[in-house]
Amino acid sequence: MLTPEKMSTCGAATFTNLALSSGTLKAPFDGVLTRWRVDVGAPSGILGYKLRVLHPAGGASYIGAGTGPAQPALAAGVNLLTLPTPLPIQAGDIVAVDCPAGAPSPANNAAKPGSTFAFFNPMLADGKTAGPTNQIPGEEELFNADLVGVPAITSISPASGSTSGGAVVTITGTRLADVTGVTFGGVPATGVVPVSETEVRATAPAHPIGAAEVHAVNAAGSSPIVAADLFVYVDPPITISGFSQSHRTWRAGSKLAVISSSPAHKAPLGTTFSFGLDPQGRVVLAFAQKLPGRKVKGKCVPPVAKNEGKKACGRAVVRGRLSWTGHVGTNKVYFQGRTPSSKLKPGRYTVTATATNSGGVQSKSKPLAFTIVK
């Protein structure tokens, strides 16, 4: 804004700046106008100003290309006016003000080298083409408007995350300062924070597995589809934690394993296996017996008379498995030595817990050793 030295009132006309001593005159890109400012020397009362878009029509002519609503009751000085509906504007267009007859003029008549003020009388209505009625050098209209352009995305980081959501994604590109929302595959993100013209952050929402287009949205529209805006949803890694047992040495019983999350009592026989699981997945407990063996051609094989002189080794022979769909959180298994296919005999064993998520990705194995006695 300029230091005001304004004309007293204006006639009914469309006023604009054809040149400025400093600052931007033409819209640098397509977008919308969301608010504007006008500096008047006195209250306007019921007289209402309108923001107008002028589109170059060749030569010295312009066409009225869009108008905002009347803005009455302005205070003396700078007024910040929000447009209830964003006003479209194209690259190369200029903005103008419709000033009603008798309203305080927002024009400055102090000498401003390089500035040219113009007016159209009658007002340049939308769809009408005309050249300025008059051009006056050294004068300037005291107004400007905020331009919001359609955002564009050039990269996202990270470019993948869990189907359960929660990843904080940094989106880089252009015209991101006025972003009001971000979507992942059409699902609104949370925690949207514009950082600058070139960066916005958002928390990815939950979404089915697969690639999702990321779009940044502002008053001018949604970012166009580009190869760099894909966010790939993957199944969260599945983990088994805190795998433990209540007893390392125990007697076998006759009951089948009981799977529960909250035991009501301690098993008088056997042991209780406990572990945490996240997320839900298919759990397998594999029971392998530790048996002596002999090293033959790099393999540990059962001891027989033919390999009696070979180096001793230890073998793990799978004797049974338990499998079920585990739930998120603590899982407990009361085990007395019976699986659906076998009953473990006295001896030394290793139980290995693994889990597989819905995408077929397996967790790291968790082993425990125990002994069954008579």
Image (cartoon, rainbow, N blue to C red):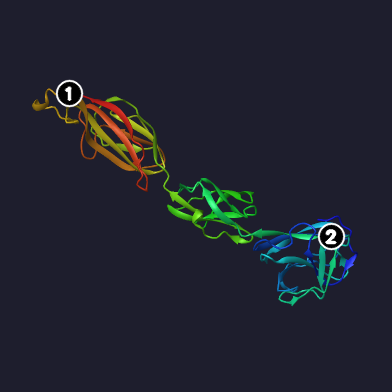
Q: CA distance from mark 2 to mark 1?
A: 101 Å
Residue situated in front as seen by the camera: 352 or 159: 159
Closer to the camera: disc 2 or disc 1? 2
Q: Secondary structure at mark 2?
A: loop
What residue would you read off at disc 2? 113
Q: Quadrant of the N terminus?
A: bottom right
Q: Residue at x 89, y 64 (%)?
A: 7
Give 56 or 71, whichever is nearer the viewer: 56
Which residue is found at the position 53% from the left and 51% from the top? Answer: 155
Which residue is located at x 50 percent, y 54 percent?
228
State the image coordinates of residue 335 (x, y, percent, origin top left).
Answer: 29, 33
Q: Amino acid at mark 1?
A: Lys
State the quadrant of the C terminus: top left
Question: How many dots with numbers?
Answer: 2
Per the rendering, the mark at residue 311 is 1
Q: Is residue 372 above or below residue 53?
A: above
Nearest to N terminus: mark 2 or mark 1: 2
Q: Position of residue 76 (x, y in %)?
A: 86, 58
Around disc 1, counting alpha carbons within 10 Å, would you say few (fewer than 14), some (14 to 19), or many (20 or more)? few
